[in-house]
Image (cartoon, rainbow, N blue to C red):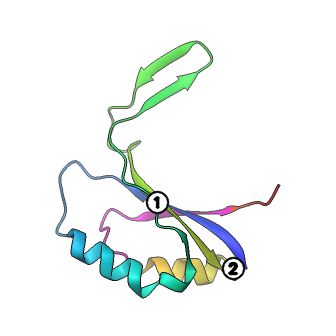
Amino acid sequence: MKKFLFIYNATPERGSDTDEDWMAWFESIGQHLVDVGNPFQGGTLVKGDAVTNITSFAELVGGYSLINATDIDQAAGLAKSCPNAAGIRIFEAIPM
């Protein structure tokens, strides 16, 4: 199995998803969950000595989860039923 990082896009306002929707989805993919993750609030971008607040919702991340899947296609299949209407970015975590 490979590890994949699900990064949940943020939205300016709360969507129609509820905590119960998220918990039901996590339960449905439970055998693949490595770390359910956490939601995020705000953010800061650091580039060398420059530190700025992230204010654009296009750049904001709502949270993350780490999952096991055989490949990116299986990971994408698991993501399709996620209640986050703003979308999910999926990245393979390369072992080091």
Q: Residue at x 44, y 64 (%)?
A: 88
Question: Measuring 72% from the left and 74% from the top, which residue is drawn there?
Answer: 2
At horizontal 23% and vertical 75% (from top left) the residue drawn is: 20
* Kind of element beneath mark 1: loop
Q: In x, y percent, where is residue 89?
A: 50, 61
Give the x, y percent position of residue 74: 60, 84
Which x, y percent locates residue 46?
54, 24
Magenta-span inclusion, residue 32: no
Q: CA distance from mark 1 to mark 2?
A: 20 Å
Q: Nearer the viewer, residue 11 or 67?
A: 67
Which of the image's four quarters has the N terminus? bottom right
Task: Say which of 76 and 5 sits in front.
Answer: 5
Could you say which quadrant of the image residue 81 lies in? Answer: bottom left
Q: Is residue 59 above or below residue 66?
A: above
Q: Which residues are magenta?
A: 81-92
Is-magenta flag for residue 82? yes
Q: Identify residue type, mark 2.
A: Asp
The image shows residue 50, relative to residue 77, as above or below, that is above
Residue 28, numbered circle = none
Vertical arrangement, residue 5 with respect to residue 52, above or below: below
Categorize mark 1 by other alpha carbons within 10 Å: few (<14), some (14-19), many (20+): some
Q: Name the residue carrying label 2.
A: 71
Residue 63: percent from left, percent from top: 41, 54
Report the residue that reaches farthest toward the right.
96
Callout 2: SS:
loop
Q: Which residue is mark 1?
A: 37
